[in-house]
Image: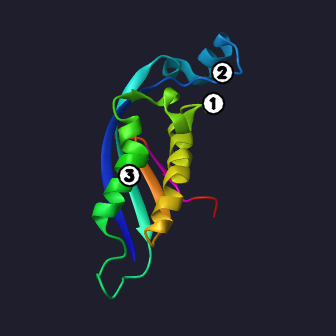
Amino acid sequence: MRITRRERFSSAHKLENTRLKSEDNKQIFGKCNELHGHNYEIFVTVEGEVHNDSGFVIDLKDLKKVMQDKVIKKLDHQLINDVDFMKNKIATTENLCISIWNELEKPIKLLGAKLYKIKINETENNFFEYYGNN
């Protein structure tokens, strides 16, 4: 069984590879090399067996708390480039997906489920999905 929880956050970012010159960053990232923001939606999907005692795969209140504590509180109304789990990374949504996976995988496992997918909607036209290293 798979279940999904959605949360929202608003953040700014600047696409920049700090190892490159300013001109190279402008060439690679174009307008996204300038500071700009998005209203993101994140969908975290977990999978596992339905527990006989609760009827849950995982209590959604617990999943919400983990998502809030590990991700949303750190990202909402912040500069993604400065968030602890995004330090020294290019602040693309691809890298954001991977970093969020790394933040959530262990706490979700401790709750008795397995992280299946991270999906982030950056705009109404662009979304990103990550399924771990599998």
The image quadrant of residue 57 is bottom left
**Looking at the rendering, in which quadrant would you find the N terminus?**
bottom left
Where residue 18 is drawn, which disc sits there? 2
Q: Is residue 129 above or below residue 34?
A: below
Seen from the viewer's position, the closer of residues 117 and 23 is 117
Crowding around mark 3 (Cα neighbors within 10 Å: few <14, some 14 to 19, many 20+) is many
Residue 15: horizontal and vertical position, in percent? 54, 25
Which region of the structure is painted magenta?
127-131
Disc 1 versus disc 2: nearer the observer:
1
Residue 79: horizontal and vertical position, in percent? 44, 26
Q: Which residue is mark 1?
A: 88
**Looking at the rendering, in which quadrant would you find the C terminus?**
bottom right
Q: Which secondary structure is most common in the magenta stretch?
A: strand
Q: Residue at x 54, y 39 (%)?
A: 85
Residues at marks 1 and 2 touching, judged by CB atoms closer than 8 Å: yes
Q: Is residue 124 above or below residue 103?
A: above
Which amino acid is tagged 1?
Answer: Asn
The earlier-in-sequence mark between 1 and 2 is 2
